[in-house]
Image (tube, rainbow, N blue to C red):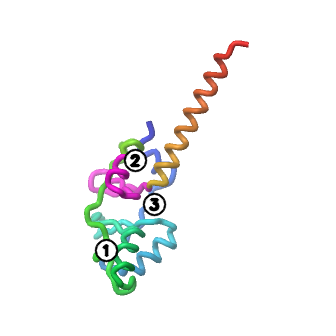
Amino acid sequence: MIRTQHILDIKGNDIWTISPDDSVYNALRLMARCDVGALLVTEGDKLIGILSERDYARKVILFGKTSKETKVSEIMTSKVITIHPLQTLEECMDIMTKNHVRHLPVMDGEKIVGVISIGDVVKNIIYKQRETIKDLTSKTSSNLVV
């Protein structure tokens, strides 16, 4: 059973954050520079929201706002769904699917320890399935009578 902490151990614990008072334009520049699809919005060490490319597309462009004049706090998602390091990949997939989110901050109590994306989850589920297939194939081959 693969747990969230395993994903963080492999990909690292990079956490990209932005202030709620920063401009959406600066947030987009940071996302592009870091090659991520979402940023955690923090005040000090406290998680107060998440800003994704989807937020930008739906709350800036469609409403005729400009990214340089709009603050992160105006379009961020304030109700952040989080997980803890011991949750399984299956639990993460279920949470992401039910809540229509692509990024989950990983929290150990009040401390942010990482972020996992739907891509991270899918990649690890595919790896797990390949290993299972390999194990089943080798067991089947060893049980063949010649």
Q: Mark 3 sits on what residue? A: 14
Q: Is residue 65 above or below residue 85?
A: below
Q: Secondary structure at mark 2?
A: helix
The image quadrant where one finds the C terminus is: top right
Q: Earlier in the sequence, mark 2 or mark 1?
A: 1
Packing grade of label 3 (10 A; few <14, some 14-19, many >=20) is few
Give the percent coordinates (x, y) of residue 54: 40, 68
Say what amino acid the circle numbered 3 marks: Asp
Q: Which residue is mark 2?
A: 93
User: Within the image, what quadrant is residue 110 found in?
Assistant: bottom left
What amino acid is at disc 1?
Ile
Q: Earlier in the sequence, mark 1 or mark 3?
A: 3
Q: Amino acid at mark 2?
A: Met
Q: What kind of element bears circle 3? A: loop
CB-based contact (under 8 Å), mark 1 and mark 3: no
Name the residue that disc number 1 marks. 75
Q: Nearer the viewer, mark 3 or mark 2?
A: 2
The image shows residue 96 at horizontal and vertical percentages of: 37, 52
Which residue is painted at 62% across and 22% down in the image?
Answer: 140
| Mark positioned earlier in the residue sequence (3 or 2) | 3
**Quadrant in which the N terminus appears:** top left
> How far is disc 1 from disc 3 in space, using C-alphas?
23 Å
